[in-house]
Image (cartoon, rainbow, N blue to C red):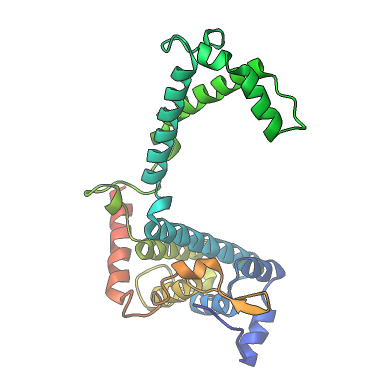
Amino acid sequence: MSDQPSDNRATNAQTLSLPDSVLVALSVARINPARFDAVIEAFGALPSDGQVELVNRLIGARGEYLSHRMWRCDTGTRPGAHRRRLNEIGTTAGRLLRLLHRDRADPQPWNLHPAATLALPQLCRIASEHRPNQIWDPPQGLSLLGAMLADLAKVGAQADAVFEAPFPKAHGGERRQGHEPATGLVDRLMEVYEDMRARFPESGPRPAFGDPLLRFVRAGLAFAVSTRTIYMDGKHREPFEAAFMEVDLPKPTRVTDDAIRGLWARRHSQTKGE
């Protein structure tokens, strides 16, 4: 959802009244300040420090939503793919380490296989051709290679710990684990709403399901899927994150009032259970 600056004078005047730190944060995140104005209008008046906190929390929620969307859209970025590749790297490194040594069960620097040691002159020539300005000590280089292969073999064996799944596992395996990005975003917006109301109670009514909450969530959804075009090479271009945005999220037909009500109820039933 690419947003162009509003021509509405009242909106522009309100935008100019935003704290400088808020305007900077919005500029860095490439978000139209009018989207934040709409959030403030839905939430209620806030002092400058409250506006700064709110914009940073909204940008944080937007960032989590984008990361979740990228993870869903690009299977190559999923932790499972990284784990498999790192495990393959570690397994291959371990095999190379065993091939490098005479006794495959004892991969020590002094136990190099003749296939490696007798090839040292040729290794020197190849190294000098590729890196003529670098002096390479073959014995030291082979020792360093062995150490690096040993380290890769160890880290490959720890692939599950290195690339932990960012979302809780659920029935059906990793492809179906966790909540949907939109669901997570709505839940974060409700969390922000409650926390900000607690910190600034004069800004509006106590947190409850109703019109104030609905208006804030919808304004927050519009904020989260908002982008501004980038002027590059003589053209206005969409930023890369625009490809992952669900631009219809703010529409009541996409995220319904009943869906928000259900998430609110579930959130508070979990709180009571704790």
Residue at the right extreme of this rendering: 133
Report the number of discs. 0
Residue 192, horizontal then vertical, whole percent: 47, 62
Does the image show residue 195? no
The answer to whether 119 is drawn above or below residue 128 in the figure is above
Does the image show residue 63? yes
The answer to whether 43 is drawn above or below residue 169 in the figure is below
Residue 238, horizontal then vertical, whole percent: 55, 74
Q: Which residue: 61% across, 91% down?
A: 8
Q: Nearer the viewer, residue 122 or 154?
A: 122
Q: Which residue: 45% across, 36% down?
A: 162
Q: Nearer the viewer, residue 178 or 192?
A: 178
Quadrant for residue 186, please give it. bottom left
Quadrant for residue 45, please give it. bottom right
Q: Which residue: 48% across, 61% down?
A: 61
Q: Nearer the viewer, residue 155 or 226?
A: 155
Residue at the left extreme of this rendering: 171
Residue 171, horizontal then vertical, whole percent: 22, 48
Q: Which residue: 44% across, 33% down?
A: 89
The answer to whether 224 is drawn above or below residue 172 in the figure is below
Q: Nearer the viewer, residue 100 or 125?
A: 125
Q: Is residue 122 left or right of residue 161?
A: right
Residue 77, horizontal then vertical, whole percent: 43, 51
